Amino acid sequence: MSENPTSSQVAEVAIIGAGPSGLTAATRLTKAGLKPVVFDLNAAPGGQVYRQVESPQADLRVTGIDYRLGQRVVEAFRRARVDYRPDSRVWWVQRVDAGFELGVLHEGRSAVWRARRLILCHGAMERPFPFPGWQLPGVMTAGAAQILLKQGGLLPEDAPILVGSGPLIYLLGWQYLQAGHPPTCILDLTPRLQWRLPLRQPGKAWHARGYLFKGLKMMLALKRAGVAIERDIEALEAIGDKVLEQIRYRQRGHWKQRPASLLLSHVGVMPETHLTRSLGLTHRWHAEQQSFLPVRDDTLSADENLWVVGDGAAIGGAVNAMREGTLSALEVIASYHGLTKKERHERDGLRRERARDLCARQLLDAMFLPSLNIDAMPEETIICRCEALTRGDLDQAISDGAEGPNQLKAFTRCGMGPCQGRQCSLNATLLLSRRLAQTPDQIGQWQIRPPVQTITLGELATSSMVENRVT
Ligand SMILES: Cc1cc2nc3c(=O)[nH]c(=O)nc-3n(C[C@H](O)[C@H](O)[C@H](O)COP(=O)(O)OP(=O)(O)OC[C@H]3O[C@@H](n4cnc5c(N)ncnc54)[C@H](O)[C@@H]3O)c2cc1C
C-alpha cells in the first residue's frame, strides 16, 4: 500500500474518536489554525458519555445535568467547523515513515488515510465480567442497556436487576428511576471495606467530593424510591433453560435465589486497547485499574507524533478526557511552532487541574477495585463467548503446555471470534497469570492484527489499497 500513495487522502492531524477527548482536541487544534480530521464510528458526536447529546429527545432529567457540559463541548466543536467524519470506522492503523496510515470504513467503502500526527481518543469498554449463565438471553451489560436508553430512549419492559460494582450501576439505576422505570434491586459486589475508604483517605475524599456526593445522592434517591440495595454479594449465577429465569447469589456466605427476566451486569470500565496494541505500543498492567494501559510520557505522547488521551489511555472520566484532549492539541501545536506565553499558561493550568483530578481518581479506583477471582468461577463458566470456551477448557490448554496468550489462542481459538478477544483477552491473561504464577505484565496479552473492527470481505474489496494492487 505504501508504493502507491496517490489514492490515499491526507490529513495534517488525524483524531480517532469524537467523545469528550476527541472533540476538545479537534476544537483546540482548529482554533490554532490547524486542520484535523476526526473519525468516529458513531453517527453523532459525544462519545459514550454524551451519546445523542444533540438530539431534541435528549432528556436532561434522565441523562443528568452533566449533559449540559456535553452540549457545550459539542456546540463548540460544531462552531469550529472541524472536518468531522461520522459513521467512519477505523479498522486498521499502522506507522509508516512519514506518520500513520489508517483504514477507514465509511458507508461500506474502505479508504486509506495518511496523517503526520495522530491523536487516539477512542475511549473505554466495559470490563468483561464472566459468571455462570452470563451468555443467556436476558443477561446483558449495564453499559449496553445505557446505550439503548441514551440512543433510542429504550426502557426495559420488566424492571431489571442491576448487579456489579462501580458508579455506572448506580447511575443507570438512577436514570431508570428518572425515566419512571426503577430497577427491582441493585446487588452490589463492592467489598464492604472499600466503601469505607473515603473516611480513611480524607485528603483524596476532598478532591473526590463532587463524585462522592453525586453517587450518594443517587443512592439515596434509589432507596427512597424503594429500590433494594443489597451489599456483600460474593458470587452470582444466571439460571435458565433457554433464557434467564432466575438468579442465584451468595451474600455473606448464604445462597439466595430470585426470579429474574433481565439482569444487567457491570464491573467497571477499562481502556480499549486494540488500536494501541496494534500500533505496537508498550502497555503496562495497572493494578488499581485492573487493566493494561498504554505507556505515555508527561506530554501524553506514547510514541513520536502519537498521543493517546482520554479513557482509551487510562480511566479518568469525561472531564479528565476533555482536559487531556486539549492538552494533546497544545502538544501538537507546540510540535509545529512552539507555544505562545498564553498557550503555555493554558497548558500549565490544565496540567495542574489534571493532577488534582487524578488524585480523586485514585480513591475511586480503590473504592471500586473489582474483586474478580477467576479461581472462584466454576469451571463451566464461559470465558470466550465467541468460541464458547469455558474456564475448564482454558485450564486444560494451560495444563497441556500453553505458556502464554498467543499459545492459548492457538491451542483453543480463544479470542479468534468476531469480538476479536475484547470479551476474553483480559481474563485469559489473568487465568494464565494465576496458573503460571507470573504477573500480568510477564504474561502480556495476545498480539493484535488488523482488522481491529469488523469488516466484511465485500467492504475490504472496496479498499483503495486493494484497487491499487489490482491495477
Ligand atoms: C459503556 C460505557 C458507558 C459509559 N457511560 C458513562 C456515563 O453515563 N457517564 C460518565 O460519566 N461516564 C460514562 N462512561 C465513561 C466515559 O466513557 C468516559 O469517561 C468518557 O466518555 C471518556 O471520553 P473519551 O473521549 O475518552 O472516550 P469516549 O467518550 O468513549 O469516545 C470515544 C469515541 O471513539 C469512537 N471510536 C472508538 N474506536 C473507534 C474506531 N476504531 N474508529 C472510529 N471511532 C472509534 C467511539 O465511537 C466513541 O465515540 C461510560 C463508559 C462506557 C464504556
Image (cartoon, rainbow, N blue to C red):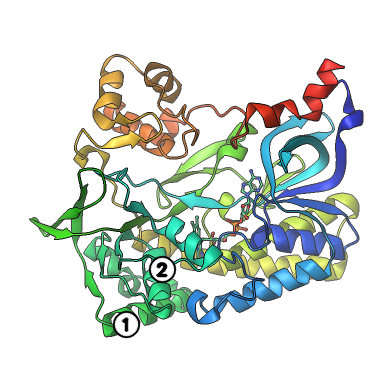
> On the rendered structure, is 74 left or right of 117?
left
Report how many numbered discs are placed on residues in the image.
Answer: 2
Q: Residue at x 22, y 40 (%)?
A: 377
Callout 2: helix, strand or loop? Answer: helix
Whether residue 326 appears in this view of the structure is: no
* Residue 201 vs residue 406, the one in the foreground: 406
Q: Is residue 74 above or below residue 85?
A: below
Which three-letter amino acid code belongs to the residue tagged 2?
A: Leu
Upstream in the sequence, badge 2 or badge 1? 2
User: In the displayed structure, would residue 215 be above or below residue 464?
Assistant: below
Which mark is in front, 2 or 1?
2
Q: In the rendered image, which quarter is residue 234 located in?
A: bottom left
Measuring 51% from the left and 78% from the top, which residue is drawn there? 64
- The answer to whether 396 appears left or right of 350 in the picture is left
> In the rendered image, which residue does mark 2 sit on?
172
Which percent across, then down, holds residue 307?
A: 70, 47
* Image quadrant, ligand 1: bottom right
Q: Residue at x 46, y 66 (%)?
A: 154
Q: Residue furthest bottom?
A: 224
Can you give x and y, in whole percent of width and height, for residue 131 in the image? 26, 45
Ligand 1 is within 8 Å of the C-beta of the residue at disc 2: yes
Residue situated in front as seen by the camera: 327 or 454: 454
Q: Quadrant of the N terminus?
A: top right
Amino acid type, residue under disc 1 in the picture: Leu
Mark 1 vs ligand 1: CB under 8 Å? no
- The answer to whether 161 appears left or right of 341 in the picture is left
Which residue position holds label 1?
220
Q: Measuring 41% from the left and 56% from the top, which residue is drawn there?
A: 268
